[in-house]
Amino acid sequence: MNTATDRLPCQRALFDLPRELVYLNAAYMTPWPKDFVAIAEAAARQRLRPFTIAAEDFFAPSEEVRALAARLFDAPAEAIAIQPAVSYAVATAARILPVARGQTIITLAEEFPSNYYGWARRAREVGARLRVLDGPADTDWTARVLEAIEEEGERLAIAALPNVHWASGIRLDLARIRTALDEVGAALFVDVSQSLGALPFSVRTIRPDVATTVGYKWLFGPYALGFTYVAERWWDSPPLEDNWIVRLGAEDFRRLVDYEDRYMPGARRFDMGERSQFLAMPLARAALKLVLDWQPERIARTLEALSARIIAIFSEAGFKAPDPALRAPHLFGLRHESRDVVSVHATLARHQVLTSARGELLRVAPHLWVDDEDLERLAAVVQRL
């Protein structure tokens, strides 16, 4: 019987990946399994006959998807909002988390820009300071954040952080950081887009105020459909937009003209408009079920072993990976003392090995489709760099 710590077998047969291609770019976008095409076609065909879309179809599918996403956050379903992007979640958090003139918001150098721009705007609006913690992308970010919390003290209002740095794969010890933030009364916003689905995550342990993810990376879902956890203490806060579907009694279309100030319970008030997403929601449902069936614990264990083999191949050519004690098992940035990362990335791509260049790092992000033949092809290409 399989346990949560067993490694998973290779899943390449599920995907339509050319045999000559070595796809090591899950952090950019994961491919859909082949059977998702039929799901997408069925959803599209429904629009040929819109009269088959019932009032309950505006609610029941999204509630099922909300509950599935909640399991990956280790949260109750009512704590999850359906949102389109990290930028939307940042805008929501910037609206509800308090920050005043003279206070500080911290984020990381070379962080994904969606976790920067919204906080920069909010800091300008209220006269606060956005402090971008310096350091190369593959530094020990936990240590840097803890130092900054101690330096800022009670001036610190919000820490806007990733679970895993998107360029380097450096993992932050969010439980330790949360404890330090508690001591100065600061809030925690977490972008888990580069980890949720590939790593176990629990809001019960991390206790973020807000945590968000896109759906199209490690969750295998559609673009423009993501999920945001909002802690219960913020459920009475004003949402970013005022849409009809999150209002109490919205299921009764006949009564929509009886305007209602009250919201549906929990974090649903923070849902995006048109959240029913008739085309995307069936794909999100299938994707979340796929990841939950694999189990994030087993995915992480499998990718840890796979990443070690890939790092060994690159090490033979002089590339250096972050300390295993600091990096995540599924995503890592490689450095080379004398090679330009852009040219290396381009050379690999010409030989059908797909990675990403992010800042000064070559970002490598494998997943369960990578097999021994892929690694043999990779080794042959890397040896010729």
Image (cartoon, grey):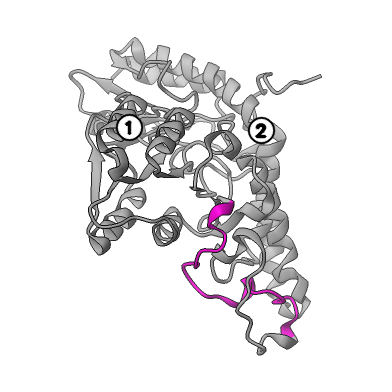
Quarter of the picture containing the N terminus is top right
Can residue 38 be seen here? no
Q: Position of residue 50 (x, y in %)?
A: 71, 78
Tell me which amino acid carries mark 2: Ala
Can residue 128 be seen here? yes
Q: Tag 1: Cα neighbours inside 10 Å, few (<14), some, or many (≥20)?
A: many
| Marker disc for residue 13 | 2
Between marks 1 and 2 in the image, the one whose residue lies nearer the viewer: 1
Give the structural element (helix, strand or loop) at label 1.
helix
Reply yes or no: does residue 323 show up in magenta. Answer: no
Tell me which amino acid carries mark 1: Val
Q: Position of residue 348 (x, y in %)?
A: 34, 29
When the figure is inspected, residue 73 is found, relative to residue 303, above or below; the finding is below
| Residue at horizontal 46 percent and vertical 67 percent from the top | 240
Q: Main secondary structure of the magenta part?
A: loop
Q: Tag 2: Cα neighbours inside 10 Å, few (<14), some, or many (≥20)?
A: few
Q: Nearer the viewer, residue 136 or 367?
A: 136
Q: Which residues are magenta?
A: 232-253
Q: Are marks 1 and 2 in contact (CB under 8 Å)?
A: no
- Please state if 253 lies on the left or on the right of 178 as rendered: right
Q: Position of residue 165 (x, y in %)?
A: 38, 34
When the figure is inspected, residue 74 is found, relative to residue 90, above or below; the finding is above
Q: Mark 1 highlights which residue?
A: 145
